Amino acid sequence: MQDRYSDIKSKIIEQCENDSEVRAIIAIGSSTRANTPADEFSDLDLIIVTENTEKWYAGEYPELFGRVSISFTEPTLGGGIERRCIYDADKDVDMIIFTPLQFSSALKKGEAGLVMNRGYKMLIDKDGYAEKAAEYVSPEISSEEITESEFENLVNDFYFHNIWALKKLKRGELWSAKMCIDSYLKSRLLKMIEQYQLCKNTKDVWHDGRFLDSWAESSVTERLKKCFAHYDSDDCMAALLETHSLFAFLAEFVAKKRGFSYPEAAKKCAAKYLSGK
């Protein structure tokens, strides 16, 4: 498959090799992965290690690599800032910008590994980061199991917000209710899906639900179809009930498999309120 970003990468390398303030450019993401490789919809993900971050924050540098149609910044891992750009009509380039100190710290703390452990490629390396990355970034993918106290907190958090969401529905605050049901509660549900799959020996559970349909059981993804709502009060209620039911099933399985104490009182409290009894 032809590399849609070859021209942009060439311009970045040419410009940054001659800039003494830029210490490293590292490609990450789909362009470096062996499994789930880049396709026509993929972006270009880069780590920029530079002594002068303002050139990248202010937009001066991104403009040198092509015609920028959309550009903004947002906080990212390790205290860095990410510059996200659309070049031309649809070339999505994400640049995580670190100072050398920030990047070294992110490597040692394992934060950089979160975005590098599925593959990376050194495009520019003036300070021997390849050796440092080899020390701290592991190609072995394994997701972390939560502790019993984290499990208990997650379950109570979820059931608390079942009641909170229904109160918003009853009050007529449809936006707030829907955002809780289809955003906050879904983030809690995703966490429990991950833990359920880990109990089923699924070692590589992607972050933020990425490629969920490839690593979650089909019985789970099938039930998810009824967990999301239209902007409608009755539909939100149906989605809330299905989300509650799926989470309860997964959580009880995880508790039994791990030998955790299950917060039964929390489940009964939420179920009673949802049933209107």
Image: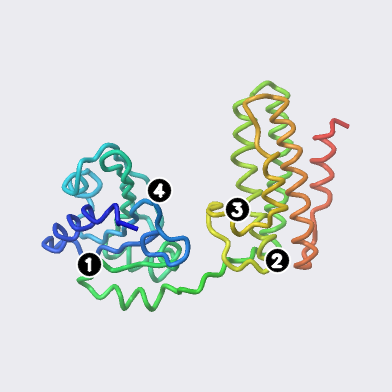
**Considering depth in this image, is 92 or 267 the residue closer to the camera?**
92
Q: Secondary structure at mark 2?
A: helix
Give the CA distance from mark 4 to mark 1.
25 Å
Q: Secondary structure at mark 1?
A: strand
Q: Which mark is residue 124?
A: 1
Residue at which label 3 appears: 213
Give the CA distance from mark 1 to mark 2.
41 Å
| Vertical position of residue 20 compared to residue 212: above or below | below
Residue 214 sits in quarter: bottom right
Quadrant the C terminus occupies: top right
The x and y percentages for residue 7 are 21, 53
Label whose residue precedes the other's in the sequence (4 or 3):
4
Mark 1 Cα-neighbour bin, 10 Å: few <14, some 14–19, many ≥20: many
- The residue located at (82%, 42%) in the rendering is 269
Q: Secondary structure at mark 4?
A: loop
Q: Nearer the viewer, mark 3 or mark 1?
A: 3
Q: At label 3, which amino acid type do we have?
A: Asp
Q: Which mark is residue 199?
A: 2
Give the CA distance from mark 3 to mark 1.
35 Å
Q: Which mark is residue 139?
A: none
The x and y percentages for residue 272 are 85, 38
Quadrant the N terminus occupies: bottom left
Q: Nearer the viewer, mark 2 or mark 3?
A: 3
- The residue located at (77%, 50%) in the rendering is 248
Give the CA distance from mark 4 to mark 2.
32 Å
Q: Secondary structure at mark 3?
A: helix
| Vertical position of residue 219 compared to residue 138: above or below | above
- The residue located at (46%, 73%) in the rendering is 139
Label whose residue precedes the other's in the sequence (4 or 1):
4
